């Protein structure tokens, strides 16, 4: 290979674009080295947080000097990818902090837990920045395989093993769909590059490429947990250890959404209505499912499905309005940033409760929490209100941005249906809040709630982020 | 001649793939899988992808098969023998579920088949049909150059993926002492 070729591909831009990925991969290697000797194990938190912060620093550097496309146009580190990267890193860090107090110190494989957790954001970043179906595919696997293992990490619980297996089998099926679709697209067009594919789609895809695109979209909708691909969500979210659920609910969804927004140009124009319909059906499935739940973790899982529906409206709006719109991307980023803080905080509190026993995630056992642990009940209330989209929280502004983008794309009926669904959603969020404040505590099921500083700090951070996004959104919108 | 060879290889590939799923005896499944890999390699050769065919034989026919055989050997197969225990297993006998799965499979298969056939009808039109690969597509230098320049990110990321998978498999497969639930440790 001649030096010119090397210089053409591996230049300073490429190094800057890949710096977050390389930082995380380096952190992974150091974590493995840290397992060699006993005293080095203590470096583990330092290494984990250090690599996350290092990667975040590299993303911030990219934010100031974005790189359009590197490595022959297969990976992009533009502004949106850098912001998505920060969302992924925040989600991973929140999950890690809660995992620290969730698992007992004597539990084996804690080092392996951190290694797997650190691998997932590499995959997410590759998914968000992919300009080539191959890059996306490896990113998807890099995200999914650690999550399959992490979901069944508590092998002493049969639910956890079941969740891991279910996630693995269905995930493998969806990856199979993606590969099949990608191979059809390649056979029909002769390229896997999104830039070339978008140009080809503008002149009309052949039926074969359209079938391939349908398969690719199906696998993305599976990762986004959209109806009718959402059936795995309640079981997996409930069965998996709660810190892992944080990553699944926020990070995976964000990564799948980032890529789906990138490929809307490959979908036929007429599909906007169909996607919007799927979005409304997803909201209906999530909200109606959540109404009848008695377990808070399962309720939040269904609420996650409903939120996926809201996010899918953005995809429909972007398809309807034609080109890659700035509004849709920034609405998606703000929504996911708010969702990471909100769902991360809510699931984090659940992890806290669940560490003391499985049954403490029942809504029943939350009765009287407002009197017993006022600060915790207040935080939970804030997160639930933000999930419901009440003003002065980040969730309200996020929903407002999504619906205004949908209205701009002339999908008025679907936007109205979405708003109505949000109202239904309030019913079950308020039910939990009512249980915490208005119903008397039943002593035999009260969670002991051991004091844990790091979980408390993470919760406080999430609550502050939700409030700041609701009251002073310009802090975040200025970044976008 | 080439056409005939392709149809024979394709038929063998489909039949053996069905055999992998339907065979009750795991060893029969493994041997079917081996023949399936072999016939796929023949199809690759006929399509002009010598390198891919060689890799298929080496990696899948060789390494992956050995792994499968190891697993079959190491597992206690008593429970998997035909007519033994799974007579009572609802998974094998739930007609409604099998019918549902079959319906989904048929629907997906026919949808893609219709798309492919309609695509094939347009083959004569240069803009709409299948795009043949460039000359020298399968040549080793071209493959190596693509892998280490344009596709170096997925190539390197795949090694991270393998590393993470190794770690994960170790966690899942290692025999653990029984762990009491998280709450019991605290005082």
Image: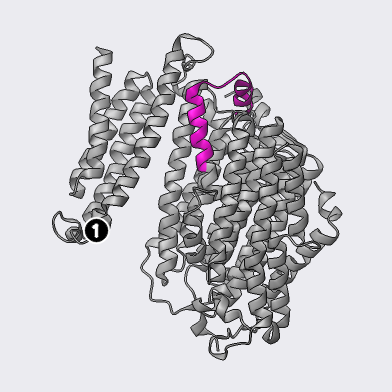
Give SS at disc 1.
Answer: loop
Crowd around label 1: few <14 · some 14–19 · many ≥20 (10 Å): few
Find disc 1 in the rendering and name its residue: B75
The relative height of residue A192 versus residue B31 in the rendered view (above or below) is above
- Percent position (x, y) of residue A286? 56, 56
Looking at the image, which residue is at 67% across and 26% down? A8
Q: Which of A431 and A52 lies nearest the eye of the viewer?
A: A431
Dividing the image into 4 quarters, which one contains the N terminus of chain A? top right
* Predominant SS along the magenta part: helix
Looking at the image, which residue is at 40% across and 62% down? A162
Q: Which of B104 and A434 lies nearest the eye of the viewer?
A: A434
* Residue with the most extreme left position: B83
- Percent position (x, y) of residue A216? 51, 36
Q: Which of A75 and A165 lies nearest the eye of the viewer?
A: A165
| Residue at mark 1: chain | B
Q: Give the magenta range.
A: A194-219
């Amino acid at each position: 290979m001649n030096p010119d070729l090397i210089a053409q591909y591996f230049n300073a831009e490429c190094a800057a674009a890949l710096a977050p990925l390389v930082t995380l991969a380096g952190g992974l290697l150091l974590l493995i080295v840290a397992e060699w000797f006993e005293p080095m194990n203590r470096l583990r938190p330092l290494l984990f947080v250090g690599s996350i912060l290092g990667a975040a620093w590299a993303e911030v550097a990219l934010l100031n000097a974005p790189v359009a496309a590197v490595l022959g146009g297969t990976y992009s580190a533009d502004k949106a990818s850098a912001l998505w990267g920060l969302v992924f890193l925040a989600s991973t860090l929140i999950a890690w902090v809660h995992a620290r107090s969730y698992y007992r110190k004597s539990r084996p494989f804690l080092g392996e837990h951190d290694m797997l957790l650190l691998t997932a954001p590499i995959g997410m970043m590759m998914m968000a920045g992919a300009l080539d179906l191959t890059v996306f595919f490896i990113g998807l696997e890099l995200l999914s395989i650690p999550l399959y293992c992490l979901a069944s990490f508590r092998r002493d619980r049969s639910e956890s093993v079941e969740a891991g297996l279910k996630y693995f089998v269905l995930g493998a099926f969806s990856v199979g769909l993606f590969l099949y679709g990608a191979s059809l697209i390649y056979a029909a067009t002769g390229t896997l590059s999104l830039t070339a594919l978008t140009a080809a789609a503008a002149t009309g895809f052949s039926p074969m490429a359209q079938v391939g695109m349908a398969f690719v979209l199906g696998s993305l909708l599976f990762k986004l947990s959209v109806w009718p691909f959402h059936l795995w969500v309640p079981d997996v979210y409930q069965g998996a250890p709660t810190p892992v659920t944080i990553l699944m609910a926020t990070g995976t969804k964000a990564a799948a959404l980032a890529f789906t927004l990138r490929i809307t140009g490959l979908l036929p124009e007429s599909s906007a209505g169909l996607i919007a319909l799927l979005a409304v059906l997803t909201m209906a499935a999530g909200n109606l499912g959540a109404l009848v739940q008695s377990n808070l973790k399962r309720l939040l899982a269904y609420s996650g499905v409903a939120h996926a529906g809201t996010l899918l409206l953005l995809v429909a709006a972007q398809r309807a309005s034609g080109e890659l719109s700035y509004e849709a991307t920034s609405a998606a980023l703000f929504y996911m940033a708010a969702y990471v803080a909100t769902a991360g905080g809510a699931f984090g509190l659940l992890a806290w409760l669940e560490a003391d026993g499985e049954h403490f995630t029942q809504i029943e056992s939350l009765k009287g929490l407002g009197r017993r642990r006022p600060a915790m009940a207040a935080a939970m209330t804030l997160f639930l209100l933000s999930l419901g989209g009440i003003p002065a929280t980040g969730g309200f502004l996020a929903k407002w941005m999504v619906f205004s983008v949908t209205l701009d794309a002339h999908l008025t009926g679907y936007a109205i249906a979405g708003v109505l669904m949000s109202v239904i959603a309030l019913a079950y969020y308020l039910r939990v809040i009512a249980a915490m404040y208005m119903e008397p505590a039943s002593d035999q099921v009260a969670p002991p709630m051991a004091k844990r500083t790091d979980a408390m700090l993470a919760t406080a951070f999430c609550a502050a982020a939700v409030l700041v996004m609701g009251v002073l959104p310009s802090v975040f919108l200025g970044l976008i | 001649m080439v056409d005939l060879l392709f149809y024979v290889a394709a038929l063998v590939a489909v039949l053996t793939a069905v055999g992998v799923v339907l065979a009750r005896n795991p060893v029969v499944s493994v041997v079917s899988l081996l023949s399936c890999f072999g016939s796929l390699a023949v199809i690759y050769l006929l399509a002009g992808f010598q390198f891919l065919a060689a890799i298929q034989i080496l990696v899948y026919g060789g390494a992956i098969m050995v792994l499968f055989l190891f697993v079959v050997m190491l597992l206690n197969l008593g429970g998997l023998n035909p007519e033994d225990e799974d007579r009572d297993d609802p998974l094998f006998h739930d007609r409604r579920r099998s019918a549902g799965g079959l319906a989904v499979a048929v629907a997906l298969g026919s949808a893609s088949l219709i798309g492919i056939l309609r695509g094939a009808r347009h083959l004569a039109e240069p803009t709409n049909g299948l795009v043949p690969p460039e000359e020298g597509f399968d040549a080793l230098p071209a493959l190596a150059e693509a892998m280490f320049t344009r596709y170096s990110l997925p190539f390197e990321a795949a090694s991270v993926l393998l590393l993470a998978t190794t770690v994960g498999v170790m966690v899942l497969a290692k025999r653990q002492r029984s762990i009491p639930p998280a709450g019991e440790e605290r005082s």
